[in-house]
Amino acid sequence: MAHSRENSDLRDEKLQELEETISNQKNLIDSLMSDRESLSKLRAELTSFKSAAITRLVQSSHLIEQLRSERSRVQALEAASLSSARQHEVINASLEVSL
């Protein structure tokens, strides 16, 4: 009878250990699933951030090109203005000489 009792106690102990192992594994699986969801959300946020950064980069490139074009136009206007001022100086000098 004592031997049967020991076997029963041992079986109950092993069963308890097995239940704890199963519980721990379920908790681990739940934790991993939660981590997976978090990683999926982070991946989506990173993709969105990357897309926004690329959009801003393209916009910046367009603005830089517009600024370069505007700078060239301003430089051309300045050159034309200087040329016009020189022509006026020449005309004024000619008028002064002829007077």
Image (cartoon, rainbow, N blue to C red):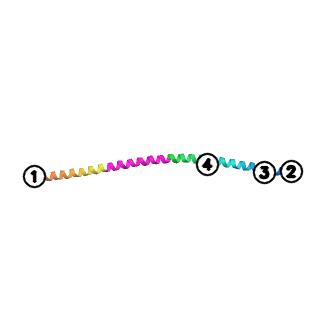
Secondary structure, mark 2, is helix
Give the numbered dot on residue 98: 1
Residue 5, disc: 2
In the rendered structure, find residue 12 and report the number of the disc placed on it.
none
**For this rendering, which residue is in front, 38 or 96?**
38
User: Relative to residue 76, is residue 22 drawn left or right?
Assistant: right
Q: Residue at x 39, y 49 (%)?
A: 61
- Magenta part mainly helix, strand or loop? helix
Amino acid found under the numbered disc labelled 3? Lys
The residue under label 4 is 35
Question: Sequence order check: which comes first, mark 1 or mark 3?
Answer: 3
Three-letter code, disc 2: Arg
Q: Which residues are magenta?
A: 49-71
Q: Residue at x 26, y 51 (%)?
A: 78
Q: CA distance from mark 2 to mark 1?
A: 137 Å
Marks 1 and 2: in contact by CB < 8 Å? no
Q: Classify mark 2: residues with Cα within 10 Å, few (<14), some (14-19) or many (20+).
A: few
Q: Which comes sooner in the sequence, label 2 or label 1? A: 2
Report the Cα–Cα distance between label 3 and label 2.
14 Å
Q: Earlier in the sequence, mark 3 or mark 2?
A: 2
In the image, 30 versus 79, the foreground residue is 30
Q: Give the side of residue 52 with respect to residue 92, left or right.
A: right
Closer to the observer: label 2 or label 1?
A: 2
Task: Please tell me which residue is depicted at 61% across the width and 48% down the height of the picture.
Answer: 35
Residue holding disc 3? 14
Indicate yes or no whether the magenta region holds residue 61. yes
Helix, strand or loop status at disc 1: helix
CA gap, disc 4 to disc 3?
31 Å
Q: Nearer the viewer, residue 20 or 93?
A: 20
Tell me which numbered mark, 4 or 2, is placed earlier along the sequence: 2
Q: Earlier in the sequence, mark 4 or mark 3?
A: 3
